[in-house]
Image (cartoon, grey):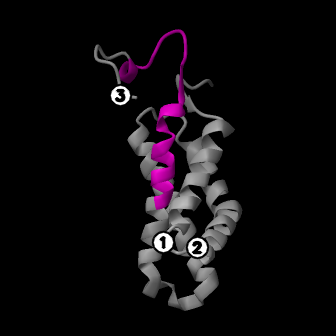
Amino acid sequence: MSRPLRVTFGPGAFLPGAALTVVVFGFPLGFPGYLYGTLSALILGMPLALAAGIVMRPVRNQGLHVLAIGGAGLVTGMITLMYITGSHWPSMWGMVLWTGFCAALGRAAVAGLVTVHDASGPQPAALTASEPLEP
């Protein structure tokens, strides 16, 4: 079964988005922020973002992609803090929100680099509306 619509981008967008996420995350925190941000991004954040991106391939709206990656950033921040601080992670909930914000910002920055692949042939009724869908 082929999907009628796919949204893709390659390493030319994925890696700069991830790098921007780590740079913005570590900026107010200094060297420890860059260290933990890089390790968290490599071990947990990038695989979660890649999985979220694969799940979101049939969705054309880039705002939903940004929200999904922001959610992956929230999960990354929460799991990382749970690992580092144990049961005291709720006292650092601001760091979890900052992680999600940085991930969403990194994804929003590369939203213009996506490629939308429309299938040739009959389109589902939702995609054949007279007005074009938003990018």
Return the disc, 1 or 3, that comes first in the chain's sequence: 1
Q: Quadrant of residue 60?
A: top left
| Amino acid at dot 2 | Gly
Q: Quadrant of residue 76?
A: bottom right
Residue at x 57%, y 79% (from the top left corner): 81
Compare residues 66 and 127 and report the one nearer the observer. Answer: 66
Return the disc, 2 or 1, that comes first in the chain's sequence: 1
Which residue in the protein does label 2 denote? 33
Q: Which-is-in-front pick, marks 1 and 3? A: 1
Spatial distance from mark 1 to mark 3, Cα to Cα?
34 Å
| Amino acid at dot 3 | Glu
Q: Position of residue 101 (x, y in %)?
A: 43, 61
Name above or below for residue 58 compared with residue 66: above
Which residue in the protein does label 1 denote? 28
Q: Secondary structure at mark 3?
A: loop
The part of the chain drawn in magenta is: 102-127
Compare residues 83 and 28 and report the one nearer the observer. Answer: 28
Which residue in the protein does label 3 denote? 134
Say whether residue 130 is magenta.
Answer: no
Q: Are marks 2 and 1 in contact (CB under 8 Å)?
A: yes
Determine whether, in the image, residue 131 is placed left or right of residue 21. left
